[in-house]
Amino acid sequence: MTTKPTPRVRVPSKAAAGELIEIKTLISHEMESGQRKDAQGNTIPRKILNKFSASFNGKPVFSADWHPAISANPYQSFFFKATESGEFTFTWKDDDGSEYTAKNKLTVG
Amino acid sequence: MSSGLTRRSTITAGAAAAFASLLGSRLAFADEKAVAAEIKKLYGDKAMAEGKIKLDVPEIAENGLVVPVNVEIDSPMTEADYVKAVHIYADGNPQPGIVTYHFTPACGKASAATRMRLAQTQNIVCVAEMSNGTLHMAKANIKVTIGGCGG
């Protein structure tokens, strides 16, 4: 039932210096809240992505602490002011300790 | 039929009691106090100002499982003056927390959007912490037609 989470990120590949760009991210994940019960009445243990973070050239830009109230297949969008070319690293942290990452290049000029 | 305990009233009372016990045992929801306690844990009794926050949520959510929430805070986002953190809470979910955002001046604009689960009709509370330590607060009510909780 559980599939490996696949991140999808939409970042413009090019931007003018000083331009404000919107970054949209989506990752497939069930975000099991820990509130649901299975057919036998046992609580299904919580398993969510609890942290999303974005950095550019190694410098942190934005992060979000997610609680169980975040929908399945969590979507997150935010903004970034482009000043120089470089690479984004997006990281999602799972309750079970695993990490999923995505990288996107941005050219400013 | 001189007795006050009619058949109808007995049934109604029984149903109400069953409903109440169901609510009490299975659905333990947060309330306004829980949200206030969470905020107090972080910021104590610091004063909250109004304004600056644009909390963009639907008035009526047909599906409580996926409710878009978009927050934008009015800030120049420079090294000297930016939005440090934004917390979003719900007062009618099993747990009060929804999300906490950490912004940096590199964001250029203090705005973020995600999708949340809401178990029932309730209030959303948003608290923004500026880099100079001042706090702002905004509230919105969302009517939920189908709750996004349990299974």
Image (tube, rainbow, N blue to C red):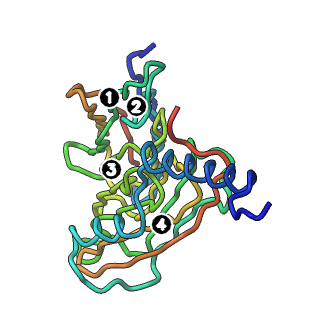
SS for dot 4:
strand
- Dot 1 crowding, Cα within 10 Å, few <14, some 14–19, many 20+: few
Q: Contact, CB < 8 Å: mark 4 with mark 1?
A: no
Q: Where's residue A73, x and y in %?
A: 48, 32
Cα separation between marks 3 and 2: 18 Å
Residue under circle 2? A32
Q: Contact, CB < 8 Å: mark 4 with mark 3?
A: no
Identify the mark nearer the N-term, 3 or 2: 2
The reply to whether residue B115 is visible in this rendering is no
The N terminus of chain B, quarter of image: bottom right
Mark 3 belongs to which subunit? Answer: A
Q: Contact, CB < 8 Å: mark 2 with mark 1?
A: yes
Residue A45's label in the rendered image is: 1
Q: Contact, CB < 8 Å: mark 3 with mark 2?
A: no
Residue A64's label in the rendered image is: 3
Mark 4 belongs to which subunit? Answer: B
Cα separation between marks 4 and 2: 28 Å
Identify the mark nearer the N-term, 2 or 1: 2
Q: Contact, CB < 8 Å: mark 1 with mark 3?
A: no
Judged from this view, the residue extending furthest toward the front is B2
Residue under circle 4? B72
Nearest the eye: B99 or A91: B99
The image quadrant that residue B88 belongs to is bottom left
Q: Where's residue B20, x and y in %?
A: 52, 52
SS for dot 1:
loop
Cα separation between marks 4 and 1: 33 Å
Instruction: Determine the residue positioned at 56% across, 46% down.
Output: B18
Q: Are marks 2 and 1 on the same chain?
A: yes
Disc 3 vs disc 2: which is toward the camera?
2
In this rendering, the answer to whether A79 lies above or below B129 is above
